[in-house]
Amino acid sequence: MSAAIEFQDVRVRYPGGPALAVAGVTFAAQSGTVTAVTGPNGSGKSTLVKALLRRVPLAGGSIAIEGVALGQISLREAARRAAVVPQREEPAFPMTVREYVALGRFPHTSVWSTSDPDGDRAVAAAVERAGVGGFLERHTDALSGGEWQRVRIARALAQGGRLLVLDEPTTFLDMGHEMAVFELLAELARDGMGVLLITHQLNLVARFAHHVVLLHGGTVAAQGPPAAVMTGGILERVYDWPLVVARDPAVGAPMLIPLRAPARITVHRPMET
Amino acid sequence: MRVRFWVIALLALAAAAILGVALGAVRLSPAAIWAALLGHGDSTTVAIVQRIRLPRVALSALAGAALGMSGAAMQGTLRNGLAEPYLLGVSGGAAVGAVAAIALGLNVVLGVPLAAFAGAAGAAALVLAIARVAGGRADVRLLLMAGVVVGAFANAAIMVVYATAPPETVRGALWWMMGSADGADWRRVGWLAAYVAIGGGALVLWARDLDALALGDDGAAALGVDVERASRRAYLAAALLAAATVAAAGLVGFVGLVVPHIVRAAGVRQHRTLLWGTAVVGAALVISADVVARTIRPPAELPLGAVTALLGVPFFLFQLRRLAVRS
Amino acid sequence: MFLSSLASHSPTQRVIRATGVVLSLALAISCSGVSDRSPPGVSGAADPAGTNRLVDDFGDTLRIAGGGAQRIVSLNPATTEMLFAMGEGNRLVGRTRWDTYPLAALSVADLGDGLRPNVEAVLSVHPDLVVLYAAADNRDAAARLRAAGIATLSVRDDRLADFRRVVSLLGKALHDSVAAQRIADSVVASLARVSAATANLPPVTVVWPIEIAPLRVIGGGSYLNDLLTDAGGRNVYGAMSDPSPQVSLEDVLQRDPSVVLTTTATARAMRIDPRWQQWIADTGHRILVPDTALVGMPSVRMGAAAAQLAQLLHPEALSSSGSLK
């Protein structure tokens, strides 16, 4: 079975930009797993999502969804197979949660064929899965951060694909809401969905991800299961900050503890291979 | 709620149309008007009703519909509730075309509308071209900036014409800029109807794209929308509607700004129904404004744009109050 | 309230504020009032013998010494015509670009527009009298010319009744009231002739549009309305006191005038406008175009203007000279 999504030597340059923002990234995310892409600011994580959304052109390499290269399918077809929850999304005019989730069926209709027989069922299932049934008639600008995030996931689920891509889904959420989102993603993966997650939350990545891709300066510094990637040597080199990796007492996953900078002001380490 | 909106909107349109035919500088009895509609009666009355009032009502309705739809499309594409059909260089370009035509002594009936349309279309194309050269994509902020640039250039050109042209030209050009349904005849109505059908039809056809665009560039792309192409399409259709309206009736402001808000406030949010709604409400509004313009101080006429500009006052007061309540 | 704010600050601040107030007031006064010095063309305090004293339509006073003004700039086609008619065309050193009658006027220096004239151009021909049209737009030019020491005569010649008054003012300014009187009498007589010729003819109802968008017509407050009445026509908007009111097309249709008088350009626009076209086609009414240069203003050729109008309106009854056939 082909991977849910596969990035093959992807290169991306922003128009007018000096260097490649993504300089040869190769990895795959399988269905039924949570794959986390992480790394310092500017390492190219969000650029990958933009390339997937075709907001920036590929300067080289390819992206394939379920074995089919992006260039061979239309935007709508891609949206039917892979649902993206982008970092920022702000409806210009308030609408109800119900209307917003229903927008997820957009890729299934077009100007010429407006019928969507599975639409109602898909929306209802998505609403239930994401747990937003309690505020369907509320307006999108009247939701709390946690509620809004779940609503966005519901919209993505309504699109009906087998791949879910989320760009920093828990940035403004408190601990409780953050855990709830990760639990939901883990559950979706357990039910067969492929989940690709861009995030900073290294400790939660360690607990929930099956596969971790660590980016640094536009390339893959390391990838593999959390225990293999989240080691002191690799992380210190990539994040350029002293830290200690322990085991968390609850489930034994790697746990990252950043240290205070030492009394000497600057900490520069030469890049080790 | 929505059903009630449609009932009220359609009734308002019908009432406005009836008033538009019944009222005017000359007082006519209902019986005479009814006879004239059927073609009977005194020939002067028939001429007034069939060749002056009916075309005016039709022109006003089409202009209002075009402006309402154009405003809804602009606000959806630019994701801004303060966007207006005349925002992106359209009004400046039209004004330059019209003022130049008047200064050159071109015929008012044919030459000015054509020049206005050419100016508006040219300006819209120029805005798109500037935005593309600047950023390579139809980015919303680039469009707005380019629109400001083109508008500023147009203002300068108009001022030069005003300063060097004789007074009658200036007055004629000013009158045109203030908007009027005065020049309505069936041929002009026919042209406007064709453009409204094309532009409005395009917008209604691709209304779902506007629904998706409202989520933002990334959100829309996530739903499978080609953001650049969809924005450009909507913008061009909206600009076409605005240019055709300007050519037919001069600059009629505030309608495109206010009408989408009215319809959205009634709970209509999906763009397909929103577009129809703004067409109906816009038509009713402009017909009413035209009636006010020609009956408030007979036999003189107020410019249509002056009456619709008065709309802006309660609208902005209302928005201010809403902002104050929120914060 | 302002004074109390003055009191609430430190002494230095108060002085600064008060100085500011005084300076602003001084500035305002000096800008608004142009000293109403009486202009020369003349010597000192008492009027020497032979000096004519006139008050023009702006309320300004002029004193013209014996012999009258010798270098005249006329910024008004009507007064240019009057000066030539009085035989004083040789005293003219400047005209507007619109003054093209009589032919001799074309050899006088063209100084540009009569409304908001170029004061420098006027000064460059060293006039001792400038005749202006008394529009609000020209107050500024009149003030600036007077400040430069030049006599200005601002006249308003809008109506038929103004003609005699303006001619007489010119006569006094040129110390040639005899010629002025002669002109006035001759014009009035020619008008009376036309009036008599049309007195017994049925009046023709007329609408006189001067602009189509917006639709503006000659109303009762215009000289053309007076001319029209003398010429045996009846302006359907004669009851409106406005000289050029804006009206709506349906109102014109309702009043059903049998003749439309207008300019060539407007006539062309009407022929393309379907609504006007159809009304003309349905009713068989006529569109007539009088010579705009001739009928445009109340001046020495008014008699000929009235005659032309009368002949246009009553072609069957009158010859081209306006006399009964």
Image (tube, rainbow, N blue to C red):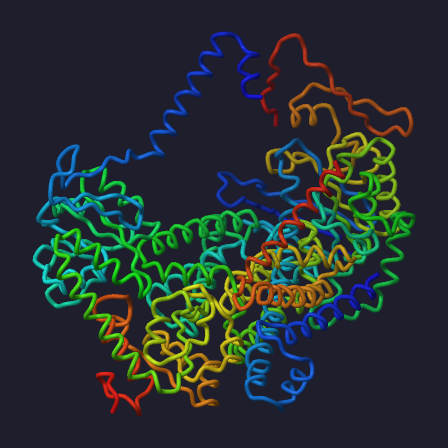
From the viewer's perspective, is B15 left or right of C149? Answer: right
Answer with the quarter of the image where residue C235 lies: bottom left
**Depth check: B101 or A146 in front?**
B101
Where residue B198 appears, x then y in whole percent?
58, 73
Q: Residue at x 52, y 66 (%)?
A: B300
**Depth check: C79 or A72 in front?**
C79
Q: Check the picture and name the quadrant holding the C terminus of chain A.
A: top right
Q: Could one spot residue B80 in this view of the protein?
A: no
Residue A72 sits above or below residue B41 on the image: above
From the viewer's perspective, is B262 left or right of B132? Answer: right
Q: Residue furthest front?
A: C49
Q: Check the picture and name the quadrant holding the N terminus of chain A.
A: bottom right
Residue A61 sits above or below residue C215 on the image: above
From the viewer's perspective, is A92 left or right of A252? Answer: left
Where residue B87 appears, x then y in whole percent?
54, 53
Q: Could one spot residue C101 in this view of the protein?
A: yes
Where residue A130 appears, x then y in whole percent?
87, 48
